[in-house]
Image: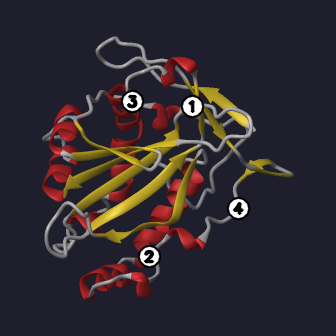
Amino acid sequence: MLSQSGMKTNTRGRAFPGLVVAAVLMLGAGGAAAAEPPADRVLEIDRYTSDRGKMLGQRYQGTLKSLNAKVYHCMPWIDVKTEGIGFYKPKHLDGDTRYLSLNVVVDQHPSPEFSRLAVQDRVSSMFSRYVPHLLRSMATDDLMNEPTVDGFTVIVSWLKIEPPAGQPPVFETAATFVPKALAVDYLRGRANIGQLAGGAHVLAWDGDAKLGAMKPKAWADDFVLTYKVAGYTPDPRVACR
């Protein structure tokens, strides 16, 4: 198991306590290398509940598989949940609204300092670290130009605290719903990360307990772009930038 200490100092000069990110890799003769991504991370066509969902799932099956491969190979400390990639309907929106959803678990061990932060600050930290970068991977040109895609959902879960011996782990989760217009403005430089956080709908959970809506603060965090797992080389067939 390879580990690296984590949270950067944000642009306001406020240092957030560290997270230890642990990437579990398969070791081969040439060092650490990942196998093929699990196929069950992309929602199957027959699992959609509307014609619109099935149409999107069918039309963009290749795009979704490419997203699965990119996360798997380029961010090996992140695990996409089973059926975690698909065109899901956000429950808080009316009609057959379809957002491309990416639902992941971050393999990390929280430091005591991170665990002592208020939940708002933990959500803000994880939003800043992961949402902008995952959104950029999700919002491909074909999906940005697809009129029946209404937005993007990034769901990130992380271990809340190290569980006592014999106790099950408890994960915190933040789900960020970004309307397409806001995603376009952010990715084209017309909105900054603070405006992205302010305009998104963010819900949080403590285990299975819903905490409700959050308004995270956000800052630039380049961890995903700069972190390297020692001895690991991504599959050269996958563009990691």
Mark 4: few/some/many CA within 10 Å (<14, 14-19, 20+)? few
Q: Earlier in the sequence, mark 1 or mark 4?
A: 4
Measured from the top left, where is residue 151 in percent x and y? 22, 61
- Label 3, on which residue? 125
Q: Which residue is mark 1?
A: 161
Q: Nearer the viewer, mark 3 or mark 1?
A: 1
Work out whether 58 lies above or below 240.
Answer: below
* Element type at mark 3: helix
Disc 4 marks a residue whose amino acid type is Ala
| SS at circle 1 | loop
Q: Earlier in the sequence, mark 3 or mark 1?
A: 3
Local packing at callout 2 (Cα closer than 10 Å; few below 14, some 14-19, many 20+) is few
Q: Residues within 10 Å of mark 1 (few under 14, many from 20)?
A: some
Q: Provide the residue designation for mark 4.
A: 35
First of labels 4, 3 by sequence position: 4
| Image quadrant in which you'd find residue 195 | top left
Q: Characterize the local packing of mark 3: few (<14), some (14-19) or many (20 or more) Cα atoms within 10 angstroms.
A: many
Q: Secondary structure at mark 2?
A: helix
Q: Looking at the rendering, which quadrant does residue 35 occupy?
A: bottom right
When the figure is inspected, residue 218 is found, relative to residue 172, above or below; the finding is above
Identify residue for label 2.
62
Say which of marks 4 and 3 sits in front: 3
Mark 1 or 4, which is nearer the eye? 1
Q: Earlier in the sequence, mark 2 or mark 3?
A: 2
Of mark 4 and mark 2, the one earlier in the sequence is 4
Mark 3 and mark 1: Cα distance apart in space: 15 Å
Q: Amino acid at mark 1?
A: Ile
What amino acid type should be assigned to the residue bearing mark 2? Gly
Answer with mark 1 or mark 2, whichever residue precedes in sequence. 2
Distance between the Cα atoms at labels 2 and 3? 32 Å
